[in-house]
Structures are given as structure tokens and as C-alpha cells.
Image: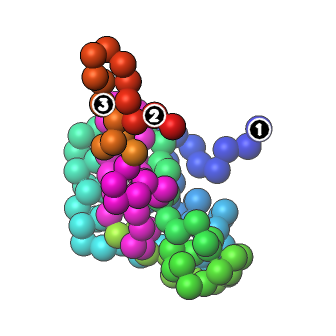
Amino acid sequence: MRFTYKEEDSVEQKIEKIAIGIYGASVVTYSVAARNRIKQIEKMGIAHFPVCIAKTQYSFSADPKLYGVVENFEFHIKDLVINNGAEMIVAIAGEIVRMPGLPKNPQALHMDIVDGVIEGLS
């Protein structure tokens, strides 16, 4: 088995190895918020956490209008999220919804327990 990056790589190295090595980007850029979060991660001593990239499902890029496999594009990291319990760092690329598939009114809103019987399940 060959891993994309090493645990001891910096957060930026991990992101760049994924974006350039796997997705085909030519360069990775970071927002001010993302750079600040990287500094926070390093200060907290959790830079060894694995990195996952959240991006559009329509493209290898962070741009949903660039369908499929594209090459030599700028991969922009908007922010990073620390999932401390899962010991994972999520790099947010572009404008995305992190929990796709949930409607505005999830079915859980229509469920209830009445006299010990669950209602609203279909």
C-alpha cells in the first residue's frame, strides 16, 4: 500500500500532495482564514492529524463548473475545520455544502413518540 502523504508532513504538504498529486492541480492557494487555521493547528500540536478535502463532487477541481477530470488548475482552500474527536482536519475547497442530501426539512422533524409508539417512520 502506498499512502499519499506521510503523517509527519505539514498540513500544507498534505493538502498539496492530495490536490496536486491526486486531483491534478498545478498550485494550491489558501485564504487568510485557511492560513490562520493552519497556524492554529500547528500551535495546538495536531498537525499530525490526517487531512481530508471537502470539495464539489462534480470535478477534481474545487469549481463545480469544471466537470470531470481537469488539469493544471488553481486549487483554492477556503478554510480548514478541526474534527478533534475524529482526529481529522478537513480542508474546505470552494463553496460546498458539507452534508449533502439533507432537505430543508428532514424527515426527523416529522417523527415523534406518542404513548410509546414511534410515529412518522415510513
Vertical side of 118 occupied by 93: above or below: below
Q: Earlier in the sequence, mark 2 or mark 1?
A: 1
Give residue 112's mark: 3
**Distance of mark 3 from mark 2, alpha carbons?**
9 Å
Give residue 101's mark: none
Q: Is residue 115 visible?
A: yes
Give residue 121's mark: 2
Q: Which residues are magenta?
A: 79-106
Q: Which residue is mark 1?
A: 1
Dot 3, crowdedness within 10 Å: few (<14), some or many (≥20)?
few
Residue 92 left/right relative to 115: right
Q: Are marks 2 and 1 in contact (CB under 8 Å)?
A: no
Query: Given the image, on which type of amino acid does mark 2 rest?
Result: Leu
**Distance of mark 2 from mark 1, alpha carbons?**
43 Å
Query: Given the image, on which type of amino acid does mark 1 rest?
Result: Met
Please state which of residues 25 and 78 is positioned toward the viewer in this rendering.
Answer: 78
User: Secondary structure beneath disc 1?
Assistant: loop
Give the x, y percent position of residue 108: 36, 40
Disc 2 versus disc 1: nearer the observer: 2
Query: Given the image, on which type of amino acid does mark 3 rest?
Result: Asp
Question: Magenta segment: does it hold 60?
Answer: no
Is most of the magenta stretch helix, strand or loop? Answer: loop
In the rendered image, the residue lying farthest to the top is 116
Name the quarter where the N terminus is drawn: top right
Give the x, y percent position of residue 10: 43, 51
Residue 44 left/right relative to 71: left
Task: Residue at 73% x, 43% y: name it.
Answer: 2
Give the x, y percent position of residue 16: 52, 64
Q: Earlier in the sequence, mark 1 or mark 3?
A: 1
Task: Residue at 58% x, 66% y: name it.
Answer: 57
